[in-house]
Amino acid sequence: MEEKCSYRTDDCINKVNIVEHEGTELKFDAFASYTNAWLEKVINHNNNPKTKYKKEQFSFVDCMCSSGLYYNKKTSKFVDGTVIRVMKIFIKLANKYPMYDFYLYFNDYDKQYYSCLQCLKRNLLKNKPINLSVEITMLDKNDFIYQLSINDLFKRRTNKSLVIYDPYDVDFDWNHLSKLLKFDSDFIFTHFLQNDFKRAVHTVKDKTKIAKYEQSYQMGFDELSEKFDKFIGELNERENAIYRSELLRDLFTELIHKYSNKKYSCYCPVFNSKAPVYDIVCLSNSSVALGVLKNAMYKLYKNKKADKVKKSKPEQLTLFVDEKTDVGIRNANVSEFEFHYNKVEILKKFKSIFKGKTVTKVEMEKILNEDPYLPSTGIFKDIIMPNWPYETPSQTGGFYKFKEDD
Ligand SMILES: C[S@@+](CC[C@H](N)C(=O)[O-])C[C@H]1O[C@@H](n2cnc3c(N)ncnc32)[C@H](O)[C@@H]1O
């Protein structure tokens, strides 16, 4: 018998997952705004009027989705996790596009979370559009991947899918993941940059942890430690932490490409107040997917900054500016945070690429999407135009024309 409970009542507090870390809510925001933008892009991608309305499917998978509803003990409030947010996005778009089919797959091996997910389904999908199917499973992630691999939907050329793989820790078993990575899907991973591991690799003695790192990075722990220590004595502690993050990022990127044969990937770091905690990594055969992630993350941090400034007292307004001293200097006094999300840094990088150039819209989008850090054209109005005016395609007859000078 399925457990009957009341949705979003005090009874849920001890059943749902707890928001523990700074950055978790930002991750939900990031997954949701990425999914929304991704879905709009893939639906509108087919502009050929002859084939526009042929039956297509759009699907979303979260391999380990947790309880969907969360509780934040600090604020004593419920928080909507990815499941709830994505359900709402899919309901909206299934209603908007009744000619297409939409599928959601949510999995978590935890029995209580499974029961919470069933409760969400009962409550949020009472009047579900008929072109939306939602499947909830309680499987170990590797069995779940196997189930997906034999599901015909993911073999159809007409199915566009987005898969999220979001473990608590560094936990990548490539024997199983390689099956998933062969799908013609777009992928989002979270890749943790564990502090204990990054800063004090020699103190990691827990055999299960060591085995997980070895499996995840496909490298013996001794070799990994040796690589970590390469610059000991040459770099200070902070520089070493950055070098080690880069090393882990390179190893992870190499593996996702090796097992997927996909062309493009990029990462966007998520920070607590001191350092990057994890990266959100996007993998796709289209560079457009990368642009979607970089834009979504840029917008989230911009809004977070605006929020922070609004809430802080006047004397605290320098809070955000000071973050470079906390986060770690990447190069030439630029913090990792600024490197990815700061307007001035984005503009500098943009100028270094486009100074004196004349490019079409398509060329411009390609360069921006493929750049590992720059958000794509979505930031034009916000950053480029007000600070470095250019001639627009309507003025030049189809080209963006950028100045020679700063
Ligand atoms: C970081 S949470 C996922 C959060 C979720 N993606 C979201 O955005 O709301 C990780 C989840 O993985 C689940 N999990 C851990 N090991 C698993 C396994 N072997 N198989 C399936 N789920 C697992 C945990 O129960 C936990 O809910």
Image (spheres, rainbow, N blue to C red):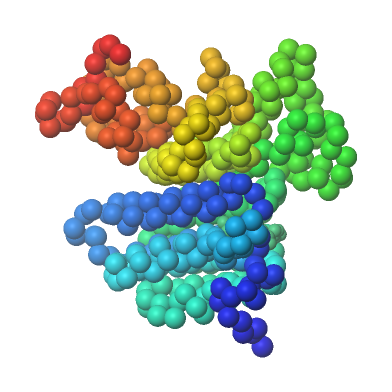
Q: Is residue 188 visible?
A: no
Q: Is residue 6 above or below residue 383?
A: below
From the viewer's perspective, tell me whether residue 295 is left or right of residue 12: left
Q: State the residue in front, 293 or 308.
A: 308
Task: List x then y, in percent, for residue 315.
Answer: 50, 31
Can residue 56 be seen from the camera position used here?
yes
Asked where in the image residue 141 lies, by quadrant, the reply is bottom right
Q: Quadrant of residue 329?
A: top right
* Residue 175, percent from left and from top: 69, 50
Where is residue 124 drawn, in percent x and y? 47, 75
In what quadrant does ligand 1 lie? Answer: bottom right
Residue at 69% x, 66% y: name it: 109
Q: Residue at x 52, y 75 (%)?
A: 121
Count all numbered tags in the image, as a single digit: 0
Q: 174 or 397, which lies in front?
A: 397
Name the spot of residue 173 as percent of width and height, x first: 70, 49
Q: Is residue 255 above or below residue 79?
A: above
Question: Residue placed at 50% from the left, 65% from the top?
Answer: 84
Q: Quadrant of the N terminus?
A: bottom right
Instruction: Give above or below for 237 relative to 93.
Output: above
Q: Closer to the camera, 178 or 222?
A: 222
The residue drawn where x is 47% and y is 62% is 85
- Residue 381 as seen in the image, left or right of residue 304: left
Query: In the picture, residue 347 is in which quadrant?
Result: top left
- Check the picture and name the quadrant holding the C terminus: top left
Looking at the image, residue 226 sits to the left or right of residue 25; the answer is right
Choose between 346 and 101: the one closer to the eye: 346
